[in-house]
Image (tube, grey):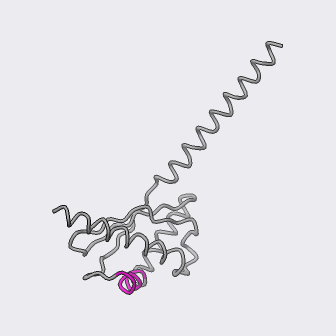
Amino acid sequence: MRKNSIKNTRINGEVQKELSRIISREIKDPRISPMTSVVAVEVAPDLKQCKAYISVLGDKDAQDATLAGLKSAIGFIRRELARTVNLRNTPEIHFVLDQSIEYGVNMSKLIDDVVRSDEGKEHEGEEDNE
């Protein structure tokens, strides 16, 4: 059992690396945002299915357009994957939008805003003491 999970982890990493390369360098669809990254990949142990979690930095329209572009290029993506990754079966790929990077960017911005407003209040307090 343990050996299988190590093998599966290696396959996930290999497929993720290749999907990232294919999406960023090989696909010429203008709908696909240049700010698209493959966050994680889960390949089923039987190698028939694959969930690819992608993150698209941008608004809802950019995310929807990127998903549509990826879905229309699915045949090309699978052929490229079959050519570059040596697997018994080339999995059927399902793209899932992952909001975690965008969520992190938004949280970081909110934290920066709070820190800036706190610093502004500190400076106001120092002026009152003078």
Residue sitting farthest toward the top? 129
Residue sitting farthest toward the left? 1
Quadrant in which the N terminus appears = bottom left
Residue 11, compared with residue 81, is above or below; it is: above
In this view of the protein, which residue sits in the foreground, 31 or 116? 116
Total marks in image: 0
In this view of the protein, which residue sits in the foreground, 30 or 104? 104
Residue sitting farthest toward the right? 130
The answer to whether 50 appears left or right of 65 in the picture is: left
Q: Quadrant of residue 73?
A: bottom left
The magenta stretch is 77-85
Q: Which residue is rendered at x = 20% and y = 67% of the image?
A: 4
Q: Which residue is rendered at x = 25% and y = 75% of the image?
A: 48
Q: Main secondary structure of the magenta part?
A: helix
**Is residue 62 on the magenta stretch?**
no
The answer to whether 49 appears left or right of 120 in the picture is: left
Q: In the image, residue 52 lies at what x, y percent?
A: 38, 67
Q: Which residue is rendered at x = 59% and y = 37% of the image?
A: 111
Residue 48, compared with residue 42, is above or below; it is: below
Q: In the image, residue 127 lies at what x, y percent?
A: 81, 18
The answer to whether 54 appears left or right of 28 in the picture is: left
Q: Quadrant of residue 53?
A: bottom left
The answer to whether 116 appears left or right of 46 in the picture is: right
Q: In the image, residue 106 lies at what x, y percent?
A: 56, 46
Q: In the image, residue 65 lies at what x, y percent?
A: 52, 69
Quadrant in which the C terminus appears = top right
